[in-house]
Every structure is written in C-alpha cells, then in structure tokens.
Image (tube, rainbow, N blue to C red):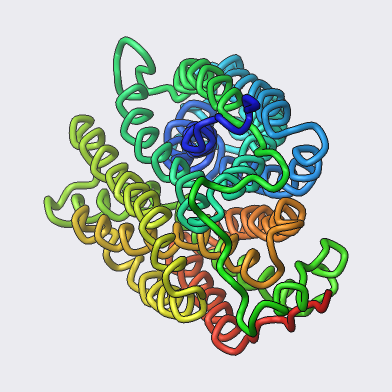
Amino acid sequence: MSEQTTFPRWIPLLGGLLGSTTCGLLLYAFSVFIKPLQAQFGWSVMDVALAYAIICLIFGLMTFPAGRLSDKFGPRNVVLIGGIIMAAGFFLVSTITPPAKEIVAAALAPNADAAAKAALQAVNQKPLWLLYLFYGVIAGFGGGCVYLPPIATAPKWWPDRRALATGFTVVGLGLGSFIMAPLAVSMINSPDIGNGSALPVFKYVGIAMFILVVIAAFCLKVPPAGWKPAGWNPPAPAGGAGAAKATRDYTYEETKKTPQFWLLWVAYFCGSFAGLMVIGLLAAHGIDAMTAAYKTLNSVTTVPADEVKKIAMAAAGAPSVLAIFNALVRVLIGPIADKLGGTKVIFVTLFTLQVAAMLVLFPVGKSAVLLAVCAALIGWNYGAMFTLFPATTLQYFGASAQGSNYGLLFTAWGVAGFAGVFSGGYLRGLTGSYLTPFVVSAVLVAVAVIILATMKAPEKKHA
C-alpha cells in the first residue's frame, strides 16, 4: 500500500487550519492598526484603509492562479512558497521608518498651518508607499497562494463530509483574527514592545507566520485518483443504476459560461463588501463612539491616557468576538449544509439577518457590550459564506474543476475587499461618520438576498 493511501486524512485539515490561521493573522484584525498608524505617521483613515483595500484585492485575485498552480504543481509547493512571501511582506512593514515625532505632532495639532502639513506630507510619501507594497502587494500575493489550495484539497479526502471539511480548512481565518486583535493591542500598548507603535507587531507576527505556513505546507497532499474512505461508497444517483452515466460535472469553461456562476459572484461580492468594510472599520468605529460617549458622560473635552487605553482594549473586543463567531460558524454550518443537501434557505436567512445587523451597527458603537453582540451576529453571518459558497459551487457544478471554479468565484471577495474598504475609508472621511458606510453595506447585502432567493440551480450536464 502506498504512502498516499495510508496518509491520515485529518492531516490536510490541520494544514488548512494552520494556513487559514496565518491568513486570519494577516487580514482580519487590521482595524486595530488604524489609530496607532495614524498617530505614528500622521496618515488619514483613508490612507491606512487603502492598504487593507489593496491586500484584499491582491489576495482575492491571487486565489484563481493559486488554484491552477496547485492543480499543476501540488498544494504543498504553492502554500510553502506563497507562505514565505506572505510572512516576508508582513515582516517588512516593521522596517518602515516613521517621520520624526515633532513633525507629526505639528501637522496634527488643531491649529496646524499649511506649512506643517506640507512638511509631514513631504516625508510621508515613501513610508506610505512602502506600507502599500509590503503589506498590500507582497503579503497579499503570498496570502492568496496560501488560502485556496487547502480548500480545494481537503474535501477530496472527505467526500463523505465535504462541507464540513471545507469549513474546517477556513475556520482559521476567524481563529487568526481572534488571536490577533487582543494580541496586537497588548503588544502596541506594552512599554517593552510597541510603546504605542504598531510596527513591532508586524515583526514578531511575521516570524510566527513563517513557522505556521511551513508546517501547514507539509500537511498537504492530494489523494490518489479514485481514493475513497474505507467503508464509504458514493450515494447512488436518483433514477436508478443507469443514472450514474446520465450526468457529469461541469468543466471550468462550462461553469464560467452559466448565469448562475456570475449571480453567485455578485452575491459573494455583496456579502464580502459588507463584511470586509465592517472588519476594516469596526475597532476604529468603537474607539470613536466610546470616546465621544465618555466625553459626553463626564463633560470633558480630553480623555485621560489611561481611559484611552481602556477604550482601545474595549473596542478591540468587538473584532475578537466577531472572530469567534466567524470561526465557529465555518465548522458548525458545514454539517447542516451536508444534511440538508442545499444552501439556499440558509443563505437567505443569514443574509437577511446581516442586513439588520448592518443597520444597527452605528448606534450600538458607544456600548462595548452592544457592539460586541452586533459584531457576533455579523461575524456569524459573514463567516458562513466561506463554507456555503464553496459548498454551493460543488453542488451546482461538481467537484472535478472545484479548484478553478472556486478560485475564480473567490475573486469576488478580492474585488469587494478593495471596493468595500476603500469606500468605507472614503465615506468616513467625506462625512466624518461611520453611519454612511454601514448603510451602504446593508443595501449591498439586501441585493445579495434578492439574488440568492430567486436564483435556480443550473441544469445538470448530460454525459
């Protein structure tokens, strides 16, 4: 018996868990960096948010070629090389040199003149572009290579529990952000590590990313052709013995020509737009809202330094709670989808709840508890997408071209990340409030509800 046939099938799940955890560290706690980077470099919310928008775009677009490369060269090679690139890009952010504190303080002072602002801008162009290059482009490129191969590989080892396997390989996205948000805040606030700076976080977490992705890569292997779990046989198709030859999987070329695929793409875009906008702005929204509430309650114009730290930690709790529910649902929703054999009702229900959550997110920001509850609901609904969309792609088009099909579908996440995060930062800067971005997100999710409620599955392909 070959090594591949005796390979424990839970190991690729571990590889997916570790790989997606590094992607969670990379992506889903970025909102906690906004305020520290603003304070250290004097950048605007839009400047910093653009870095997150770029990484979402690059990350999402890279999943398609990563799926193709994984099919050709194997998931282990793609994840290993991509992971090293991702960790290097994240680490390199720590090497960016900030402007002198005096220049930043002069430009950010309430009575700052044009000369002070121009002086800051003159020395800040290179650091900003380096942030975009290291974090957005390099780390995003590597992250896209890490994310997709386990999603295409693990279900091949679990044909009896495909949705569950998919959910397990992406659960680390939520786990990574659950770890990263409080860890980053504590490191930033620690006098011995960050002392108010976010840069050391990129250094130490970048090293941790490297270790995780190397382990993840060596956990990945493709089963031999025709492999199936011991004692398991594929369910007989409806229609009797002859039905097995009556239909076949869609090819990649056939899949991308169906209207259902592109309707799924639009729905994925809408749901991702809302989720990523919230993740990118959630902690900053909480800090602003809680700070304003503190000033009103205590009739002060300046918040004491100790209270500023407490508010930052309280606001960081919301992304952490979002991450917990984001992670839990990815595994829990899989068995439900496997049992029901479809995802339409689940999708419509969760996306309808997401519309409501987006609409109440702004007013609950001043309460750490209510913000966390709302974040939990948003994380639950958002995280479910990453199990349900791959499961729906499998259900509609079959497993033969799943790597290419889902790789192309996932580009919707990347485009949504760029559009959602950039729009969020722009609308926040334009209006001075987070209300408009959250309302726009609710409208986009409502569009997804309509699409998913009215869409019908494509006709089966005849063999």
State the residue in front, 128 or 234: 234
For the point 85% across and 73% down, the residue is 257
Q: Nearer the viewer, residue 414 or 401?
A: 401
Q: Residue at x 31, y 58 (%)?
A: 376
How many marks the image carries: the answer is 0
In the rendered image, the residue lying farthest to the right is: 253
Residue 353 can be seen, yes or no: yes
Q: Residue furthest left?
A: 298
Compared to residue 249, the image places residue 112 above or below, namely above
> Is residue 127 at least partly visible in the picture?
no
Extreme residue toward the top, this view = 192
Give residue 46's position: percent from left, percent from top: 58, 48
Q: Residue at x 76, y 49 (%)?
A: 64
Q: Quadrant of residue 32?
A: top left
- Where does the image place residue 207, in percent across and percent down from the top left? 52, 15
Residue 94, by quadrant, is top right
The front one of 236 and 264 is: 236
**Is 202 positioned to the left or the right of 181 in the image?**
right
Residue at 23%, 43% in the rendered image: 314
Figure check: 319 above or below 74: below
Q: Is residue 206 above or below residue 332?
A: above
Quarter containing the N terminus: top right
Quadrant for the C terminus in the image:
bottom right
